[in-house]
Image: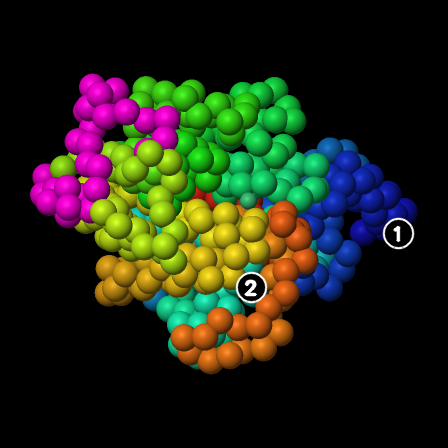
Amino acid sequence: MKTNTLLKKIISIIFFMTLLGSCSSGGTNSNVAPFADAGVDQVVTLKTALIPLDGRASRDDDGDDLSFRWELTSKPPGSSAVLTNISTSTPSLSVVDFAGVYSLSLIVNDGMNDSVADTAIITAVQNAKNIILLIGDGMGYEQVRAAGMYANGTAGTLPFERFLFQGSVSTSNASDELTDSAAAATAMATGFKVDNGVISQQIPGDASDLETILETAKRLGASAGLVTTTIISHATPAAFGAHEPSRNNFHEIIADYLANSQPNVLLGGAQFVDPVSAENAGYTVVEDYDSLIALNTDYENKIWGQFGETQMPYEWDGVGIFPHLSESAETALAILDNYQNGFFLMVEGGRIDHAGHVNDLQRNIFETVEFANTAKMVMNWAENRVDTLVIVTADHETGGLQIIANNGQGNFPEVTWSTLEHTDIKVPIFTWGVNAHLLKGSVENTDIYRVMRSALTGN
Ligand SMILES: [Zn+2]
């Protein structure tokens, strides 16, 4: 190759690179400046169908493709994966048969030498059949620690704190401000950050409805449930099963459940609901613990627990004739697991937040302990399964709680509170099961949606 030709080639490569913008998202491993793009790294679920890859190869100054080819440079042991169309810019990876990492290198030849221009990493994960998302509303790190101290004498001892993968979640909303439960739950339910008060609509934006993970699950033939200790039309459950510009549209939220999302299981406080419209929509309605546990969970497929007249009583005050959160969640699992296509279940410890807003440590801790009991029950259910993703997290912290001293098991720790409002400090996340490793470290609340969706759909 003559020097001036090489120079022209380098210039055209620089031009092409400029067109591509930031091009090399794969880990590059080149011994020359990269001048071709292997496309973005991807997380996919196991599949035998082709995975098309969107790469771009460099061209020379006549617009012709430079000589290049793709190579599958590493794959999990035992995998039969093959790469086809290796001399085109759109190769395909087929038979992604083992979970793990597949590395694809884009190799270019300048007429004399091969060099690796770019590498794309395909991470294959298993599909999850069941997704269980437990949200402690207002449950920050200190709320978790305080509950551990009270329940077991030591922080770090709640059942979900044993999960292998743990991280912290940024909770900011669309305008990067203190979130409320509506914006935070919408982020987890849809993958979009929205304004406070918005229930799964694109606001700011065109106000269109955003499909929720619950709706995706139902569209794919799975079942779905929402369980809470607040009223069932409250912001957190609403963001999974309704689309409204305001969280205060309680009647419209209930109408959305009845007419559109139709979760198979709805359990929570009964304000704004009535048994007649629920029964007309095909639900079996129960109104207390006795009627809940009398259900034949092998045969029920649409139940609505309408408990009391407002939110559920605090654990500290005694729940009376109503079920504890763990009992509601256990019934929900017993019904949802009848479905062969799996399920999505959201369980909210909704009143941790309420106790935080009035800086009431006793009620805050008792709500968190029952939320932890619920997580323990879920773990007993999931223990020997290989098809389930369990996520325990919070939507935001409430109260600015700080522990001063641990006073041992059965005693309330000494604490301070800094506010009656929410704070913007990060909240913990604990994950177990299929794809759990994708939510470790520092994550955004929208990442929770992304991982649940990829586990459910493969995309
Ligand atoms: Zn709140």
14 horizontally vs 194: left or right = right
Viewer-nearest of labels 2 and 1? 2
Q: Position of residue 183 (x, y in %)?
A: 57, 37
Ligand 1 falls in which quarter?
top right
- The quarter in which the C terminus is drawn is top left
Q: Is residue 349 visible?
A: yes
Task: Give the residue displayed 41% in from the left and 21% down from the top.
Answer: 251
Observer-nearest of 116 and 311: 311
The correct choice, above or below, for 137 with respect to 302 in the image is: below
Instruction: Say whether residue 335 is left or right of residue 222.
Output: left
In the foreground, 119 or 309: 309
Q: Looking at the image, is 256 positioned above or below residue 177?
A: above
Q: Is residue 285 magenta?
A: yes
Left or right of 344, for residue 368: right
Q: Is residue 382 magenta?
A: no
Residue 49, image x, y percentages: 36, 43
Q: Provide the residue designation for mark 1.
A: 3
What span is colored magenta in the figure?
Answer: 270-299
Q: How many labels were placed on the picture? A: 2
- Residue 321 vs 393, above or below: the answer is above
Tag 2 residue? 141
Depicted 314 relative to depicted 245: above or below: below
Give amino acid for label 1.
Answer: Thr
- Which residue does the image show at 40% across and 47% down from the upper left? 348
Question: Residue drawn 32% across and 58% down?
Answer: 374
Q: Mark 2 belongs to which amino acid?
A: Tyr
Q: Are marks 2 and 1 in contact (CB under 8 Å)?
A: no
Of residues 267 and 324, which is closer to you in this image?
A: 324
